[in-house]
Amino acid sequence: MSAFDRESVLEYHRGGKVAVRLPRPLKTKEDLCLAYTPGVAHAVREIAKTPSSVYDVTAKENLVAVVSDGTAILGLGDLGAAASIPVMEGKAVLFKAFGDVDAWPVPLDCCREGGGSTGRTDPERVIAAVKAIAPQYGGINLEDIASPACFEIEDRLDAELDIPVFHDDQWGTAVISLAGVMNYAKLAGKDMGDLRIVMNGAGAAGIRICEMLKAAGACNVTMCDRKGTIRRDRQDLNEFKARHAVDTKAQTLKEALVGADVFIGVSAANVLSGEDVKRMADFPAVFAMANPDPEIPPAEVAAALSGRRYVMVTGRSDYPNQINNVLGFPYLFRGALDARATTINSAMKVAAANALAALARTGATDEVKAIYPGETLEFGEGYIIPKPFDRRLFTEVSFAVAEAAVKTGVARRELDLAAYRADLERRNLER
């Protein structure tokens, strides 16, 4: 019986996947007086007198809220806030296991237009709810909120709160994809600005991938949606698509792909054929990241490009070069929390991508190779993205993010960067 059959999965989830762990003892009368009344009054007065001390005398410093209204659950769609809880618990588990970040699910019901449990997101209600709970948390991870409401929600919360707000569906895939494109450029011997990139999918992930590519120097990016290329002469574009409209004679995805160096898909299965990828550049990269079935099967790419160098990337763990968000969000928040950053800005995201790309170029450790027998984990076409179980991610990506926070002036904590790196290495050994 498969480990992923319905009964096995439900048994794994029985009782939930998260619980409270007490970091302080509560075994004596003195412990009780310290934890609650009368001793807790000192902590209350300290925060009232010095608001910034909330980071020192509460869990806020290392606590992230994983917030969803359940409108776009993990490819399953709008099933409501309660149905989102297993995913939000899973996200909290990944935060802790990989980034040593304490996280808690915060499903939001009645944040829909009209007040129902399903339907279109009401951005005002989500924003109000998150702002109301924010005092407890050091960061907000938005999850599975449908587009286009997710853009307004993240942008406004990021502007109105003094803690990091990060929508992983938008930015997580974007950060990891950028790392992969950076390493493809290295293999191709090209600068980011020289790459001709074609994207299919202009939702939350697609828009943010495009923004990240441009932030890292890409300047020739053509996006496509269901109606074809996103051109300046189209009258049906929303404000987010319009920002990335281009002048092009290509009307369709297949036309745009001719001669392209990179294809990036965050769309739907089987939108490309082997003939399409044959018409790309001599050494192409195919980022077919639709789940569970990619825009073109890897076997079809291999057959079409037999005898040619190429890079194949998917969102699946059963193929090399997986774009997996767990490579990003635990460490983006680890670095941001440690710096007490007020935001996760573009420089911090690009720094994370650079750190991921650099780590892949060093090849995998023996420990990682033992987890993935049969795979060649040396930098090259089949290995441009690190594996999730590479423990070096904790130090390298977290440090890069915190360093960028300091350099861009959004860190509220003064960090001795050399001492911080040593501390990360120590904490990594203790995990």
Image (cartoon, helix red, strand yellow):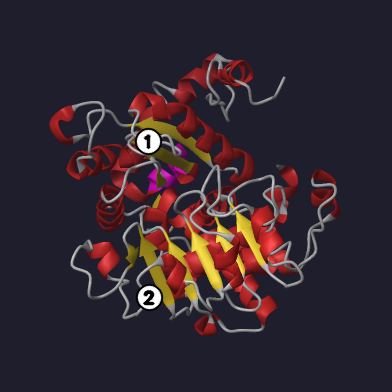
- Residue 410, position as x, y percentages in the image: 40, 65
Give the residue type at disc 2.
Ala
**What is the tally of numbered marks visible in this picture?**
2
**Does the magenta stretch mainly form a helix, a strand or a loop?**
helix
Above-or-below relation of 102 to 25? below
Residue at mark 2: 250
Say whether residue 163 is left or right of residue 385: left
Of 155 and 297, which appears nearest the observer?
Answer: 297
- Residue 56 colored in magenta in the image: yes
Pointer 1 with pointer 2, Cβ within 8 A: no
Q: Is residue 186 left or right of residue 252?
A: right
Label 1: which secondary element:
loop
Q: In the current view of this chain or complex, which residue is farthest to the left?
A: 114
**Residue 302 placement (x, y as % from top left):** 70, 60
Residue 200, located in which quarter of the rendered image?
Answer: bottom left
Q: Secondary structure at mark 2?
A: loop
- Seen in the picture, residue 134 relative to 352 is either above or below; the reply is above
Region rendered in magenta? 53-60
CA–CA distance in space, label 1 to label 2: 32 Å
Residue denoted by label 1: 77
Quadrant including the N terminus? top right
Membership of 404 in magenta stretch: no
The image quadrant that residue 143 belongs to is top left
Res 344 seen here: no
Q: Residue at x 13, y 31 (%)?
A: 114
